[in-house]
Amino acid sequence: MTAYKYEQRAHDELESWLRKVKKPSSMSKKLTKTMQTKMNSYIPKKVHDSIGEAVRHVVNTALAGTEYGKKQEVILHASLEERERKLEETIAAYRRTAAAEGAGTGAGGILLGMADFPLLLGIKMRFLFSAAAIYGFDTSDYRERLYILHLFQTAFSSERKRLEVVDRLENWGEYIKDKPKELSLNDEVNWTEFQLEYRDFIDLPKTLQLIPGFGAIVGAAANYHFLDVLAETAKNGYRLRLLTEKEDPHK
């Protein structure tokens, strides 16, 4: 396939993805949210508190630290098709890791199920750093880490928050034009809102994972699914950057 044809197909897929993420939630999703809230009421408060703190700590540590970015070789010169072949290989590897980790912790009931939250978060963050490097973006620039955070929120947020974040992604150049390269993520992120949005998105399947025996099946399937959701978001989020900047180099 020629580079032009591949980019045209990618552009069409990007437009389709943007329509999907902007689409209002279905009735079934609203009913799922009601069930999720009910099930959450049966989980002890100390479990919720522990999970919430794990979300904040793992994501904040990953974004503020240097260990994830140092392991990634930024691909500076490659076609979009070459980048995405590499991305598919990376997705497959992370998908297997996430599923295996979910099955292992899910088999152990509530204590190991709780441990799965920070472990899966770490896998997701490493994947996003890998995706950034594959698409040619250097995460030593904190503005790129802020973009990673926005991709994460696009994948795992409520409809209201998702629409807000996608609007920023579509106008990223304007959003960051006055932000310094060494910006403080703590000044940019409402961590309480962030962790609640993430937990609300994943609570139902991950709560089921806490059930001994049944949790192994749910854990593997849920982690596999969530990695796929994040992979689709990362692919189209970086397509948005590359294809938009190619159309308008001043963005």
Image (cartoon, rainbow, N blue to C red):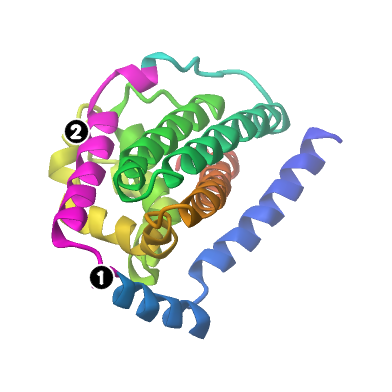
Location of residue 129 in the rendering, given as x and y in whole percent from the top left corner = 43, 29
- Classified by dominant secondary structure, the portion drawn in magenta counts as helix
Counting residues from the start of the chain, the first of labels 2 and 1 encountered is 1
Percent position (x, y) of residue 78? 66, 22
> Would you call the spot at circle 1 few (<14 residues within 10 Å), some (14-19), or many (20 or more)?
few
Mark 2 Cα shell of 10 Å, populated few (<14), some (14-19), many (≥20): some
Instruction: Check disc 2 and report its element: helix, strand or loop.
Output: loop
**Residue lying at 60% horizontally and 43% vertically, measured from the top left:** 243
Residue 190 at least partly seen: no
Residue 28 horizontal/vertical position (percent): 51, 81
- Compute the Cα span from label 2 to label 1: 40 Å
Task: Determine the residue positioned at 24% across, 59% down.
Answer: 196
Residue 203, position as x, y percentages in the image: 36, 61
User: Where, quadrant-wise, is the C terminus in this rendering?
Assistant: top left
Mark drawn on residue 224: none
Q: Is residue 182 above or below residue 17?
A: above
Q: Residue at x 58, y 43 (%)?
A: 235
168, above or below 182, in the image:
below
Near-viewer residue (85 or 29):
29
Secondary structure at badge 1 equals loop
* Res. 27 in view: yes
Q: Say which residue label 1 marks.
A: 42
- Disc 2 marks which residue? 183
Q: Which residues are the magenta region?
A: 40-69
The residue sitting at 25% across, 23% down in the picture is 65
Front disc: 2 or 1 = 1
